[in-house]
Image (tube, rainbow, N blue to C red):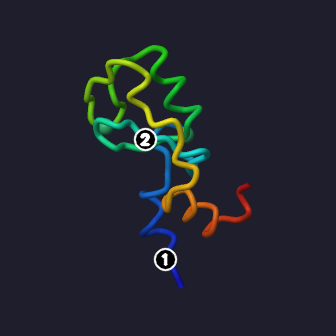
Amino acid sequence: KVNLTSINKYITCSLCGGYYIDATAIVACQHTFCRSCILLYLQTSSYCPVCDRQVIVSSEICTSLSDTTLQMLVYKLLPNIM
Ligand SMILES: [Zn+2]
Ligand SMILES: [Zn+2]
């Protein structure tokens, strides 16, 4: 059985505090957020909210990580949130 508490920090968006929805990563630093969260954040900032690395253009954001292991993990562990 997986310990959700220990894994929570890896699948939780630091912007909204919830689990990743349509997980999207900044290419430069690989920090991951909900797609809607990071796109909204970057309308008013040019820096990664976690490590302050500069994000020059929005194309540096991965379009989507929906098919990645990370997002699959969220869906698998937390079927009730969807
Ligand atoms: Zn979020
Ligand atoms: Zn970062």
Asked whether, in this view, residue 31 is left or right of residue 1, the answer is: left
Residue ID at (63%, 68%): 76
Work out whether 1 lies above or below 64: below
Spot occupied by residue 11 in the image (x, y as percentages of width and height) = 49, 56
Ligand 2's image quarter is: top left
Residue on which disc 2 sits: 25
Q: CA distance from mark 2 to mark 1?
A: 24 Å
Give the amino acid type for the residue marked by disc 1 in the picture: Asn
Circle 2 — which element?
strand
Disc nearest the viewer among 2 and 1: 2
Residue plotted at (45% across, 37% down): 62
Quarter of the image holding residue 29?
A: top left
Q: Secondary structure at mark 1?
A: loop
Is residue 25 shown left or right of residue 53? right
Q: Quadrant of the C terminus?
A: bottom right
Query: Which mark is drawn over residue 3?
Result: 1
Q: Residue at x 55, y 36 (%)?
A: 35
In the rendered structure, the answer to whether residue 25 lies left or right of residue 56 reads right
Residue occupying the far bottom of the picture: 1
Local crowd at mark 2 within 10 Å, few (<14), some, or many (≥20)?
some
Amino acid of disc 2:
Ala
